[in-house]
């Protein structure tokens, strides 16, 4: 029911969206993607398809004097057989850069996953509406950050005053790629994932290619990074290669070189920061794969354990310490001829003392408080004077 306002419906087009690299037309509206169609066509993995369609860092951005905003969406929410329902995804509304409202949507589809068999069933549901009333009656810039953990089809945008795209503010664009921790894992909301926090603290525009479970040095991801205009680039490599047990040390080094070579084809002088894994005790010295522990699933507690054997390191299996050593060596080697390539040890973002204070609840993923800590530390280390992303070091033109 829309009786209190004279609603204006504005088509949702690419010029109103940031953080998405592709926009797919669906029977309901538009679906933002964080990988382009060509990349999606080169991998049939369901985990990747789900992760890239979850709009971490994607936001509607527009200028208006509207005092009320409504957004119709059709979500696809994850659920696990035998476990309590997961919390609803959160929409954050910002007015002129400040949080002014939070809401969730009802209805939508549910993707019911049976982790014991690996199967999933889609249970369809209706379109829902997220509402933001009571906004200040003045011209302002609105951002609606979409839930990082729900596939979100955008159906309709309604306001009680006209909408136009927000002008480019001339801020540098930071393009980041990583695992589920970069994707958002268990952050409180879309603007409090650690990359979103770091971007806000540092005054840059974020494109977040954190892909839960899918930071696997895929060539199509490297090409996406290569082809996306950016002033600053970071890649966080390691944990997914261990917890999927995807490759051995012999393949890892050349794969990293190839990944970096591809990025450099499109961004030859852009500041490029390689970040190794944060501390994860179960995999510091023990290879993967990670396997779920279902013993407390009925209480809503899913935890993980390392299923590898430390002795397997001798045959080339990867651990987080092995990966850190190799990344540090490779970056040092390449930086001799690439002064804009930098390395950050992930334990400087979250290390042993942090784990003692803020342990990983499921042994793999940080909680909301830890996202805030990592985001603040990344901003301080990467964007501070003398850091790899400091304004006088980084290029000010998209390359």
Image: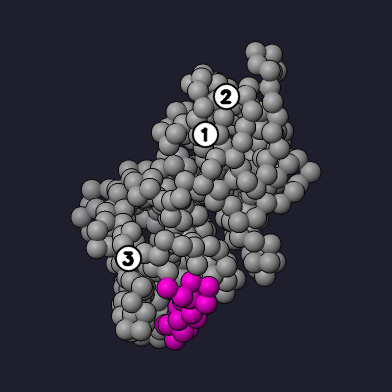
Helix, strand or loop status at disc 1: strand
Percent of width and height locating residue 271? 39, 68
Residue at horizontal 63 percent and vertical 46 percent from the top: 15
- The tag on residue 142 is 1
Picture quadrant of residue 326:
bottom left
Q: Is residue 327 left or right of residue 55?
A: left
Question: First in sequence: mark 3 or mark 1?
Answer: 1
Magenta stretch secondary structure, dominant: helix
Q: Circle 2 is placed at which residue position?
A: 66
Is residue 247 at least partly visible in the picture?
Answer: no
Helix, strand or loop status at disc 3: loop
The residue lying toward the viewer, choosing from 51 and 352, is: 51
Q: Circle 3 is placed at which residue position?
A: 393
For this orientation, the residue located farthest to the top is 4
The total number of labels drawn is 3
Percent of width and height locating residue 219? 57, 74
Picture quadrant of residue 275:
bottom left
Q: Label 1 neighbourhood size at 10 Å, few (<14), some (14-19), many (20+)?
A: many
Residue at horizontal 51 percent and vertical 27 percent from the top: 139
Is residue 17 at least partly visible in the picture?
Answer: yes
Picture layout, residue 31 above or below residue 244: above
């Amino acid at each position: 029911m829309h009786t209190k306002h004279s609603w204006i419906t504005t088509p949702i087009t690419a010029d109103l969206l940031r953080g998405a690299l592709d926009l797919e037309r669906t029977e309901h509206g538009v679906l933002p993607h964080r990988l382009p169609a060509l990349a999606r066509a080169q991998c049939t993995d369901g985990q990747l398809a789900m992760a890239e369609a979850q709009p971490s860092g994607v936001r509607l951005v527009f200028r208006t004097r509207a005092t009320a905003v409504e957004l119709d969406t059709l979500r696809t929410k994850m659920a696990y057989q035998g476990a309590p329902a997961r919390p609803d995804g959160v929409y954050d509304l910002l007015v002129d850069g400040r949080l002014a409202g939070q809401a969730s949507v009802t209805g939508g589809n549910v993707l019911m996953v049976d982790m014991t068999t690996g199967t999933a069933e889609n249970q369809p549901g209706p379109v829902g509406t997220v509402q933001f009333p009571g906004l200040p009656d003045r011209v302002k810039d609105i951002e609606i950050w979409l839930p990082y953990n729900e596939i979100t089809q955008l159906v309709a945008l309604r306001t009680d005053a006209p909408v136009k795209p927000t002008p480019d503010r001339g801020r540098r664009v930071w393009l980041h790629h990583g695992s589920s921790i970069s994707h958002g894992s268990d952050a409180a909301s879309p603007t409090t994932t650690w990359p979103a926090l770091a971007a806000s603290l540092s005054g840059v525009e974020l494109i977040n290619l954190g892909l839960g479970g899918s930071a696997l040095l895929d060539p199509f991801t490297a090409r996406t990074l290569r082809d996306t205009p950016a002033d600053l680039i970071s890649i966080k490599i390691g944990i997914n290669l261990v917890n999927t047990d995807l490759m051995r040390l012999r393949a890892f080094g050349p794969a990293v070189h190839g990944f970096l070579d591809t990025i450099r084809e499109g961004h030859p002088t852009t500041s490029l920061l390689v970040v190794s894994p944060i501390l994860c005790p179960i995999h510091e010295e023990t290879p993967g794969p990670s396997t779920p522990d279902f013993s407390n699933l009925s209480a809503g507690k899913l935890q993980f354990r390392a299923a590898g054997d430390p002795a397997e390191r001798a045959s080339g299996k990867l651990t987080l310490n092995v990966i850190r050593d190799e990344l540090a060596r490779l970056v040092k080697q390449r930086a001799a001829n690439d002064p804009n390539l930098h390395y950050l040890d992930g334990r400087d973002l979250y290390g042993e003392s942090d784990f003692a204070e803020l342990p990983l609840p499921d042994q793999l993923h940080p909680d909301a408080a830890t996202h805030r800590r990592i985001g603040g530390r990344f901003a301080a280390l990467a964007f501070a004077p003398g850091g790899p992303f400091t304004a006088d070091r980084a290029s000010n033109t998209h390359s």
